[in-house]
Amino acid sequence: MLLLAWAPVGVGAGVAVRWGSVWLARRQGLPAGQRAWQRLGPPVACGLLFAGLAWRLGPVPPLLIRSLWAAVLVQVAFFDAEHRLVLDCVLAPAAALALALSPFTPGVGLLAAVLAGAGSGIAFLLLAIAGSLVFKAEAMGLGDVKLAAFLGLILGRLAVSGILIGVILAGAVGVSLVVLHLRSMRDSIPYGPFLTAGALACLLAFT
């Protein structure tokens, strides 16, 4: 019953995510895409994720917290896929809320959140610098660095697993695109969708 009730809530959250993303895109002077995956993707993704979280967690307070993070991550993933941009105006308040909720999040806690957030952000900053030196071009944007830090805040000790899953997914897709001659080694891909996929896998898999 909870699953059936929570899935429509997720769809509603996804609709709000889409509307909010369109509004934010226009504020940035960006066009709002009207393809099916852009319009329907957030509601469908949030509906499925909310249903999965309800099935995994049941009627407990962490369901609300993880559902909130699922909605934020869906916004980040679809906006980055569409515009190659991770917005500070989304991550900054979400990060502040993550710190505030960390003491009430099972398996995280304030200290673990701070350490994981700082560690993830620094690690990705170093990767971004190294990538720029090796490829003589921006291999990873600062938005990805901030996203990695945010994932540390919401995942705590699971941040390593979530980010590793995202990096492996991004690497697999990137190599496949090069092999298929769809991209060159110098072309970049948006990391946001892959990092969020890794984080969502952890939110769903670990209760």
Image (tube, grey):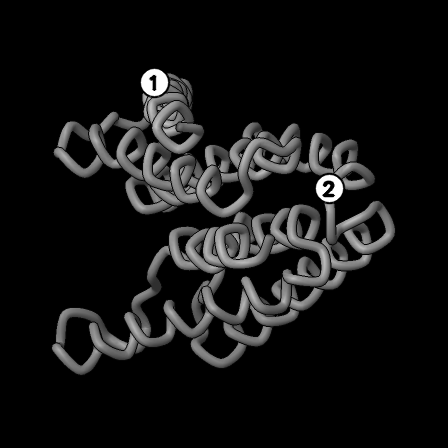
Q: Residues within 10 Å of mark 2 (few under 14, many from 20)?
A: many
75 on left or right of 107: left
Residue drawn at x 40%, y 33% as measured from the top left: 3
User: Is disc 1 surrounded by few (<14), some (14 to 19) or many (20+) residues within 10 Å?
Assistant: some
Q: Is residue 26 visible?
A: no
Q: Nearer the viewer, mark 1 or mark 2?
A: 2
- For residue 40, which quarter of the picture? top left
Relative image position of residue 10 (x, y in whole percent): 39, 27
Which residue is depicted at the point 40% across and 59% down? 194
Q: Position of residue 106 (x, y in %)?
A: 73, 47
Cα separation between marks 1 and 2: 28 Å
| Badge 2 element | loop
Residue 19's mark?
Answer: 1
| Residue 48 appears in the picture as rendered | yes
Q: Secondary structure at mark 1?
A: helix
Q: Position of residue 47 (x, y in %)?
A: 33, 33
Q: Please report whichever mark, 1 or 2, sits nearer to the chain's N-terminal start.
A: 1
Q: Amino acid at mark 2?
A: Thr
Count of labels shown?
A: 2
> Does residue 33 lie above or below 191 as drawn?
above
